[in-house]
Image (cartoon, grey):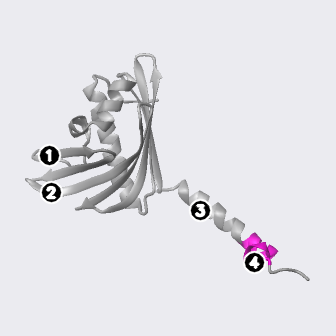
Amino acid sequence: MQSDTGLFSIPHIQERRAPLLRLEKQAAAGFHSLSLEVSIQADIRRLFHALTVPEYLEAWLSFPGELPGFSTLAARVDDRFTIDHYRAGRPSITISGNYRACRRRNVLFSWRVDGDICVPETEVEIRLRGDFENSILSLQHKGFTSRYDHSWHAILWSSSIRKLAALYGSRDRAA
């Protein structure tokens, strides 16, 4: 007598599942994530603080469509952070998240955008590695559900990283 083996042990069902897994892997290579890598003329310790200390974040984070009169206020309590962006004195965008790892060479955090634009929770990982007098900053942001969210963040991260590099007296250079 043969026992009930369940749905996934039936051969023709398993054959149908394999193509679905391939499609998920192909979709992940599209607009669902973005990656940037730049060389910045700063040591890892200084870059780590620029990435995690609220007062420093306010100096380099650059939002798409930002004009004079915009301002940014960042705060951190334990592993939670918020970044509020104001337009003409009124709240425009709030970014919030939790640090899942916050080490000098690896910063991993959740990222959610609310306000004039809303983006469900995504994940950002930033890795830092030394390169003589420079540091290589590698950023991966994943979990986007639309091309618009991906494009908005691509503009945000590229302009912000360019501004961060300029604060250290270097132009961002592809690593």
Residue span colored magenta? 5-16
The percent coordinates of residue 146 (x first, y second) are 41, 63
Inspect the image, locate mark 2, and give the three-letter code of the amino acid beneath it.
Pro
Q: CA distance from mark 1 to mark 3?
A: 39 Å
Upstream in the sequence, badge 1 or badge 4?
4
N-term mark: 3 or 4: 4
Residue position marked by numbered label 2 in the rendering = 91
Q: Which residue is mark 3?
A: 24
Disc nearest the viewer among 3 and 2: 2
SS assignment at label 3: helix
**Identity of the amino acid at label 1?**
Ser
Quarter holding the N terminus? bottom right
- Label for residue 71? 1
Pair 2/4: label in front: 4
Question: Distance of mark 3 from mark 2, alpha carbons?
Answer: 37 Å
Q: Secondary structure at mark 1?
A: strand
What's the residue at 22%, 56% (across, down)? 93
| Left or right: 59 as drawn, with respect to 149 | left
Give whichever of 158, 118 is nearer the camera: 118
- Between residue 17 and residue 173, name the one nearer to us: 17
Residue on which disc 4 sits: 6
